[in-house]
Image (tube, rainbow, N blue to C red):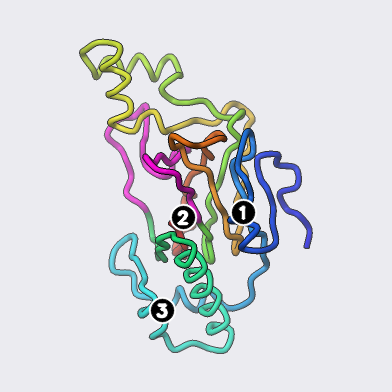
Amino acid sequence: MDNKFADQAQIAVVSTFPQLMDTALRGDLNAACWQRELEGDFKEIVSKLELKANLTEISMDDLQSLRLSEQGEVARAQIINDFQLLADAGASPSLNLIKSYERDEEFDFISTDVYSFHVDRSPIGTDTFLCTYYGAASEILPNHLAEQKVLVPEIRLKLKALHEGTAEEFERFLTEHYFDLHYQAKAGAMPVKLGLGHLWRLAVDHPAQSCLPCIHRAPLEKEGEYRLLLIC
């Protein structure tokens, strides 16, 4: 299989789940990809799941209860296997059927929803795992091609206008409202599309981290098409 991400220095491409878990993320390397070409009819699964909200969590029991064709059963077995691999590794996977995420429209100059490039933060050592089985795929952005939004002069001035207090209190305000987690692409930057079927491990900002956190975002959904995403 060709390495689709060979020219991306921040990405380690592996061929097994143990390699995905054992790859050391450090320095500029902040993403690992178990690159796969999955078989099965994931579209059939999406068509038979019930969307109860714009984002609906699908239980393994719900998935097991579907009546599927042979290719649908192949796809289901793949999802269940991925779910179990992550659970056995100590993660808490969630299978989501997504029409859309909630949008942050409070301010017209900065957004803190998942459609904005952002990093994940945790008080403990962890990683973000995700796999898009169907629909539009997530994207990541090399850190050197991104700029923290709170450091963009015009955005910072507008944020300061919302806050009255000391410089130390302002920095705490940025953290408490998650403004500091969000980034914008520099001119000419091209995001990396994570594709379908690949299982990704993305670095999170936490106290013991030895690499930069991975900047990523949810894609805009395609009109009339749901996404099927495994994430934890």
Classify mark 2: residues with Cα within 10 Å, few (<14), some (14-19) or many (20+).
some
- The spot of residue 202 in percent (x, y) is 54, 47
Residue lying at the far left of the rendered structure: 164
Badge 3 amino acid: Leu
Badge 1 amino acid: Asp
Q: Is residue 164 magenta?
A: no
Query: From the viewer's perspective, is the residue at label 1 or at label 3 nearer?
Result: 1
Residue lying at the far right of the rendered structure: 2
- State which tag comes first along the sequence, 2 or 1: 1
- The spot of residue 55 in percent (x, y) is 34, 60
165 left or right of 156?
A: left
Q: Which residue is mark 1?
A: 22
Q: Which residue is mark 3?
A: 63
- Above or below, 92 against 126 in this view is below
Dominant SS type (magenta)? loop
- The spot of residue 205 in percent (x, y) is 46, 37
102 left or right of 149?
A: left
The circle on residue 153 is none
1 left or right of 217?
A: right
Q: Which residue is mark 2?
A: 221
What's the residue at 58%, 84% (across, down)?
A: 71
